[in-house]
Image (cartoon, grey):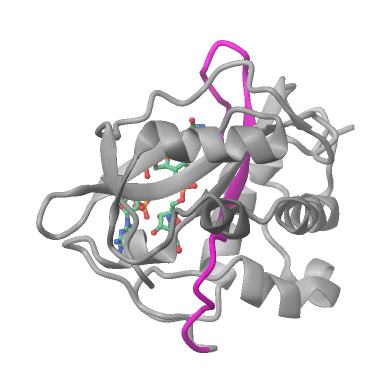
Amino acid sequence: VLSTSQDFDFFYFVQQWPGSYCDTKQGCCYPSTGKPESDFGIHGLWPEYNDGSYPSNCDPDSPFDASEISDLMSQMKSDWPTLACPSNDGQTFWAHEWNKHGTCSESELDQHGYFSSSLNLKAQINLLKILEDAGIHPNGSEYNLSSIIGAIQEATGYTPGIECNKDSSGNSQLYEIYLCVDKSGSNIIECPILPKGKCGTSIEFPSF
Ligand code: 5GP
Ligand code: 5GP
Ligand code: 5GP
């Protein structure tokens, strides 16, 4: 246990819908490895406190080191694609997530554990399939926020947090889905506190 690592209470496991990142005013860039699949991608695994606050950038002496996760690279590229500009293979995003968030859970997970746990969590729950099975499709239609939350609740047993952003015309759309995970990084739990969320009651689910 590093003296620099802070304690925390649980994780948010955050996934993003690429269509909603890309159709904002700011736009996006596909990774240098090509357009990602039409699926949710990992945004990050974020250590949190029960009161809604969170630590960040906890250990400057533990910078991201791609060589520690070389065995995970092909899965990282498919499950944790970057959509920020300029195009790159993802290391900028992964380094940002490790440095800002991952260094705050080093008491539980080293760098390899942090990324492999994230990939395992994504494999545990197929959010797109859950939504599609409930008739909620990424085709530009509008859906009730409550039906999206309800579909995930029914399929997983846990209440998700939902964050929205705005497309270039200003419509509220499904951007991120938050699930809560225990400190080990392995088990989904009911959220001690949900993100505030700024979605309308009806939100768009754009295609990608
Ligand atoms: P945004 O402006 O996209 O909502 O958030 C920008 C950044 O702030 C995120 O990428 C994330 O690093 C951080 N952030 C926003 N909300 C939370 C939160 O509830 N928990 C944690 N740990 N970080 C957050
Ligand atoms: P956060 O600070 O919210 O954890 O992560 C957001 C940061 O990661 C931003 O600086 C953003 O530019 C960068 N980033 C790189 N690729 C992506 C991506 O695909 N989605 C999001 N949300 N942020 C990305
Ligand atoms: P950061 O500066 O931390 O990269 O990101 C700040 C905010 O801007 C986040 O909400 C992030 O999702 C958004 N953002 C950063 N870069 C991009 C980008 O290239 N495209 C889009 N659509 N959003 C971005």
Q: Position of residue 170 (x, y in %)?
A: 12, 50
Front one among 95 and 38: 38
Place of residue 101 in the rendered image (x, y in percent of width and height, measured from the top left): 61, 41
Task: Tell me if 15 is positioned left or right of 167 in this view.
Answer: right
Q: Nearer the viewer, residue 79 or 206?
A: 206
Quarter of the C terminus within the rendering: bottom left
Residue 32 can be seen in this image: yes
Question: Looking at the picture, how far across and down is residue 20, in whole percent?
Answer: 33, 59
Q: Quadrant of residue 198?
A: top left
At x 78%, y 52%, the residue is 124
Q: Is residue 43 above or below residue 182?
A: below
Residue 41 lies in magenta, yes or no? yes
Q: Quadrant of residue 94?
A: bottom right
- Res. 57 visible in picture: no
The extreme top residue here reads 51
* Location of ligand 2 given as a quarter of the image: bottom left
Q: Is residue 179 magenta?
A: no
Q: Is residue 20 left or right of residue 100?
A: left
Q: Image point 80% across, 68% down: which residue?
A: 69
Q: Could you say where residue 128 lies in the image, as x and y percent from the top left?
A: 56, 58
Image height of 49 relative to 18, above or below: above
Asked which quadrant contains residue 129, the reply is bottom right
Q: What's the residue at 55%, 11% (across, down)? A: 51
The residue located at (68%, 60%) in the rendering is 64
The answer to which of 169 and 9 lies nearer the viewer is: 169
Which image quarter holds the N terminus?
top right
Residue range corresponding to the magenta coloring: 34-59
